[in-house]
Image (tube, coloured by chain):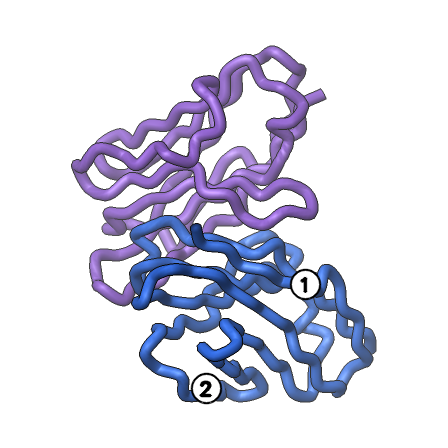
Chain colours: A purple, B blue
Protein backbone atom coordinates (compact mmCIF):
# COMPACT_ATOMS: atom_id res chain seq x y z
CA UNK A 1 0.00 0.00 0.00
CA UNK A 2 0.89 3.65 -0.09
CA UNK A 3 1.65 3.90 3.60
CA UNK A 4 1.57 2.11 6.92
CA UNK A 5 -1.98 1.05 7.68
CA UNK A 6 -3.30 0.46 11.17
CA UNK A 7 -6.63 -0.91 12.29
CA UNK A 8 -8.85 -0.19 13.97
CA UNK A 9 -8.38 3.56 14.09
CA UNK A 10 -10.28 3.70 17.36
CA UNK A 11 -10.97 1.01 19.93
CA UNK A 12 -12.97 1.30 23.12
CA UNK A 13 -12.82 -1.66 25.46
CA UNK A 14 -13.77 -2.52 28.98
CA UNK A 15 -11.14 -3.00 31.63
CA UNK A 16 -10.03 -6.61 31.77
CA UNK A 17 -10.76 -7.44 28.14
CA UNK A 18 -8.11 -8.40 25.59
CA UNK A 19 -7.50 -6.29 22.49
CA UNK A 20 -5.64 -6.83 19.25
CA UNK A 21 -4.22 -4.00 17.20
CA UNK A 22 -3.14 -4.57 13.63
CA UNK A 23 -0.40 -3.01 11.52
CA UNK A 24 0.17 -3.44 7.80
CA UNK A 25 3.59 -2.03 6.99
CA UNK A 26 4.66 -0.61 3.67
CA UNK A 27 5.20 -3.44 1.24
CA UNK A 28 8.79 -4.61 1.25
CA UNK A 29 9.71 -2.98 4.53
CA UNK A 30 11.53 -5.47 6.71
CA UNK A 31 11.70 -3.44 9.90
CA UNK A 32 8.56 -2.81 11.95
CA UNK A 33 8.16 -0.94 15.22
CA UNK A 34 5.41 -0.36 17.74
CA UNK A 35 5.34 2.81 19.82
CA UNK A 36 2.85 4.08 22.36
CA UNK A 37 1.83 7.70 22.72
CA UNK A 38 0.10 8.58 25.96
CA UNK A 39 -1.63 11.91 26.51
CA UNK A 40 0.94 14.63 27.09
CA UNK A 41 3.81 12.20 26.71
CA UNK A 42 6.29 11.50 23.99
CA UNK A 43 6.39 8.31 22.07
CA UNK A 44 7.41 5.26 24.05
CA UNK A 45 9.11 2.39 22.25
CA UNK A 46 7.42 -0.98 22.71
CA UNK A 47 8.84 -3.58 20.32
CA UNK A 48 10.91 -3.87 17.13
CA UNK A 49 10.92 -6.57 14.44
CA UNK A 50 13.73 -6.85 11.88
CA UNK A 51 13.37 -9.52 9.25
CA UNK A 52 13.58 -13.00 10.72
CA UNK A 53 15.58 -11.95 13.76
CA UNK A 54 14.22 -12.29 17.26
CA UNK A 55 12.24 -9.16 18.10
CA UNK A 56 13.53 -6.54 20.50
CA UNK A 57 10.88 -6.62 23.22
CA UNK A 58 12.75 -4.41 25.65
CA UNK A 59 10.08 -1.71 25.62
CA UNK A 60 7.05 -3.81 26.46
CA UNK A 61 5.71 -2.45 29.77
CA UNK A 62 4.42 -5.73 31.17
CA UNK A 63 3.79 -9.36 30.28
CA UNK A 64 0.23 -8.40 29.34
CA UNK A 65 1.70 -6.97 26.15
CA UNK A 66 2.83 -9.14 23.28
CA UNK A 67 3.31 -8.79 19.55
CA UNK A 68 3.90 -11.01 16.61
CA UNK A 69 4.68 -10.53 12.99
CA UNK A 70 3.46 -13.16 10.61
CA UNK A 71 5.22 -13.84 7.34
CA UNK A 72 7.46 -10.87 7.82
CA UNK A 73 4.63 -8.49 7.03
CA UNK A 74 1.51 -7.86 9.12
CA UNK A 75 2.00 -7.38 12.84
CA UNK A 76 -0.47 -7.71 15.69
CA UNK A 77 -0.03 -6.11 19.08
CA UNK A 78 -2.05 -7.85 21.77
CA UNK A 79 -2.86 -6.41 25.16
CA UNK A 80 -4.36 -8.87 27.61
CA UNK A 81 -6.51 -7.92 30.60
CA UNK A 82 -6.48 -4.26 29.64
CA UNK A 83 -6.10 -1.61 32.30
CA UNK A 84 -7.08 2.05 32.19
CA UNK A 85 -3.43 3.09 32.05
CA UNK A 86 -3.19 1.24 28.73
CA UNK A 87 -5.31 3.99 27.15
CA UNK A 88 -3.11 5.63 24.54
CA UNK A 89 -2.47 5.91 20.83
CA UNK A 90 -0.52 2.94 19.55
CA UNK A 91 1.63 3.80 16.56
CA UNK A 92 3.22 1.41 14.13
CA UNK A 93 6.14 2.31 11.90
CA UNK A 94 8.08 0.51 9.20
CA UNK A 95 11.35 1.11 7.45
CA UNK A 96 13.00 -0.05 4.28
CA UNK A 97 16.34 -1.84 4.05
CA UNK A 98 18.33 1.12 2.85
CA UNK A 99 20.81 2.27 5.45
CA UNK A 100 19.36 5.74 5.53
CA UNK A 101 15.69 4.89 5.29
CA UNK A 102 13.65 6.87 7.80
CA UNK A 103 10.71 5.48 9.71
CA UNK A 104 7.26 5.76 8.17
CA UNK A 105 4.47 5.89 10.72
CA UNK A 106 0.84 4.90 10.48
CA UNK A 107 -2.03 7.00 11.80
CA UNK A 108 -2.22 4.96 14.95
CA UNK A 109 -4.93 3.19 16.91
CA UNK A 110 -6.50 5.18 19.71
CA UNK A 111 -7.26 2.75 22.52
CA UNK A 112 -9.60 3.77 25.31
CA UNK A 113 -10.04 1.44 28.27
CA UNK A 114 -13.14 2.21 30.30
CA UNK B 1 20.91 6.92 29.15
CA UNK B 2 19.52 8.92 26.29
CA UNK B 3 17.04 11.68 26.85
CA UNK B 4 15.34 14.32 24.74
CA UNK B 5 13.79 17.40 26.31
CA UNK B 6 11.35 19.69 24.57
CA UNK B 7 10.69 22.31 27.19
CA UNK B 8 7.94 24.07 25.25
CA UNK B 9 4.70 22.17 25.68
CA UNK B 10 2.57 24.51 23.59
CA UNK B 11 3.28 27.54 21.43
CA UNK B 12 0.83 29.84 19.71
CA UNK B 13 1.86 32.27 17.02
CA UNK B 14 0.09 34.45 14.54
CA UNK B 15 0.43 33.53 10.90
CA UNK B 16 3.59 34.85 9.25
CA UNK B 17 5.49 35.02 12.50
CA UNK B 18 8.70 33.06 12.87
CA UNK B 19 8.80 30.41 15.58
CA UNK B 20 11.59 28.29 17.06
CA UNK B 21 10.99 24.93 18.69
CA UNK B 22 13.66 23.94 21.18
CA UNK B 23 15.20 20.52 21.59
CA UNK B 24 17.91 19.55 24.06
CA UNK B 25 19.30 16.05 24.16
CA UNK B 26 21.48 13.89 26.38
CA UNK B 27 23.57 10.96 25.24
CA UNK B 28 26.87 9.32 26.04
CA UNK B 29 27.32 8.12 22.48
CA UNK B 30 29.84 9.89 20.30
CA UNK B 31 27.91 8.93 17.20
CA UNK B 32 24.22 9.63 17.22
CA UNK B 33 21.43 10.94 15.06
CA UNK B 34 18.81 13.55 15.70
CA UNK B 35 15.41 13.68 14.08
CA UNK B 36 12.40 15.95 13.86
CA UNK B 37 8.93 14.60 13.15
CA UNK B 38 5.68 16.46 12.56
CA UNK B 39 2.38 15.03 13.77
CA UNK B 40 -0.58 16.83 12.18
CA UNK B 41 -4.13 16.35 13.49
CA UNK B 42 -4.48 13.24 11.33
CA UNK B 43 -2.06 11.53 13.71
CA UNK B 44 0.54 10.23 11.30
CA UNK B 45 4.09 11.21 12.14
CA UNK B 46 5.88 12.74 9.20
CA UNK B 47 9.65 12.61 8.99
CA UNK B 48 11.19 16.07 8.55
CA UNK B 49 14.92 15.77 9.01
CA UNK B 50 17.78 13.65 10.30
CA UNK B 51 21.21 14.96 11.35
CA UNK B 52 24.26 13.01 12.41
CA UNK B 53 26.50 14.06 15.25
CA UNK B 54 29.43 14.79 12.96
CA UNK B 55 27.67 17.35 10.85
CA UNK B 56 26.96 20.59 12.62
CA UNK B 57 26.08 22.57 9.54
CA UNK B 58 22.74 24.24 9.78
CA UNK B 59 20.20 23.09 7.27
CA UNK B 60 17.47 24.98 5.49
CA UNK B 61 14.58 23.49 3.60
CA UNK B 62 12.14 26.09 2.38
CA UNK B 63 10.62 27.76 5.43
CA UNK B 64 12.18 25.20 7.76
CA UNK B 65 15.65 25.47 9.24
CA UNK B 66 17.53 23.54 11.87
CA UNK B 67 20.32 24.70 14.16
CA UNK B 68 22.44 21.88 15.56
CA UNK B 69 24.91 22.85 18.27
CA UNK B 70 26.86 20.09 19.98
CA UNK B 71 28.31 22.53 22.51
CA UNK B 72 24.87 23.04 23.99
CA UNK B 73 23.43 19.64 22.99
CA UNK B 74 20.65 21.36 21.13
CA UNK B 75 18.89 20.78 17.83
CA UNK B 76 16.41 23.60 17.44
CA UNK B 77 13.86 23.90 14.66
CA UNK B 78 12.73 27.22 13.21
CA UNK B 79 9.74 27.82 10.98
CA UNK B 80 9.91 31.09 9.10
CA UNK B 81 6.75 32.92 8.09
CA UNK B 82 4.53 30.34 9.77
CA UNK B 83 1.31 29.18 8.14
CA UNK B 84 -1.85 27.65 9.53
CA UNK B 85 -0.88 24.33 7.94
CA UNK B 86 2.15 24.25 10.20
CA UNK B 87 -0.14 23.66 13.17
CA UNK B 88 0.85 20.27 14.56
CA UNK B 89 2.76 18.56 17.31
CA UNK B 90 6.47 18.46 16.60
CA UNK B 91 8.70 15.79 18.07
CA UNK B 92 12.45 15.78 18.40
CA UNK B 93 14.08 12.36 18.66
CA UNK B 94 17.47 10.74 19.15
CA UNK B 95 18.92 7.43 17.99
CA UNK B 96 22.26 5.68 17.86
CA UNK B 97 21.84 4.84 14.20
CA UNK B 98 20.61 6.74 11.16
CA UNK B 99 17.63 4.60 10.37
CA UNK B 100 16.37 4.27 13.91
CA UNK B 101 17.23 0.60 14.24
CA UNK B 102 17.88 1.21 17.86
CA UNK B 103 14.62 2.63 19.15
CA UNK B 104 14.15 6.32 18.76
CA UNK B 105 14.02 8.25 22.02
CA UNK B 106 11.41 10.95 21.63
CA UNK B 107 10.81 14.18 23.45
CA UNK B 108 7.30 14.87 24.71
CA UNK B 109 6.57 17.11 21.75
CA UNK B 110 5.67 20.75 21.26
CA UNK B 111 2.17 21.61 20.10
CA UNK B 112 2.32 24.51 17.67
CA UNK B 113 -0.80 26.46 16.88
CA UNK B 114 -0.62 28.98 14.07
CA UNK B 115 -3.51 31.40 14.15
CA UNK B 116 -4.74 33.09 11.01
Is residue A47 shown above or below A106? above
Q: Residue at x 49, y 88 (%)?
A: B60
Q: Residue at x 61, y 11 (%)?
A: A16
The label shown at residue B37 is none
Cα separation between marks 1 and 2: 22 Å
Horizontal and vertical percent position of residue A87: 64, 30
- Crowd around label 1: few <14 · some 14–19 · many ≥20 (10 Å): some
Q: Chain of mark 1?
A: B
Secondary structure found at label 1? loop
Q: Which residue is labeled 1 in the image?
A: B7
Q: Which residue is labeled 2 in the image?
A: B59
Marks 1, 2 in one chain: yes
Horizontal and vertical percent position of residue B8: 71, 65
Is residue A33 shown above or below B45? above
In depth, the one of A20 and B21 nearer the eye is: B21
Q: Chain of mark 2?
A: B
Q: Residue at x 38, y 58 (%)?
A: B95
Q: Residue at x 33, y 59 (%)?
A: B96
Amino acid sequence: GAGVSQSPSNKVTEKGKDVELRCDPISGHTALYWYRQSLGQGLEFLIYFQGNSAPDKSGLPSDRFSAERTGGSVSTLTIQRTQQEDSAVYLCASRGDSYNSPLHFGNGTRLTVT
Amino acid sequence: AQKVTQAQTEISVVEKEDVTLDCVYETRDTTYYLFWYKQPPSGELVFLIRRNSFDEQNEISGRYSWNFQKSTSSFNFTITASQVVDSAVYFCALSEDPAGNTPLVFGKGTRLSVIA
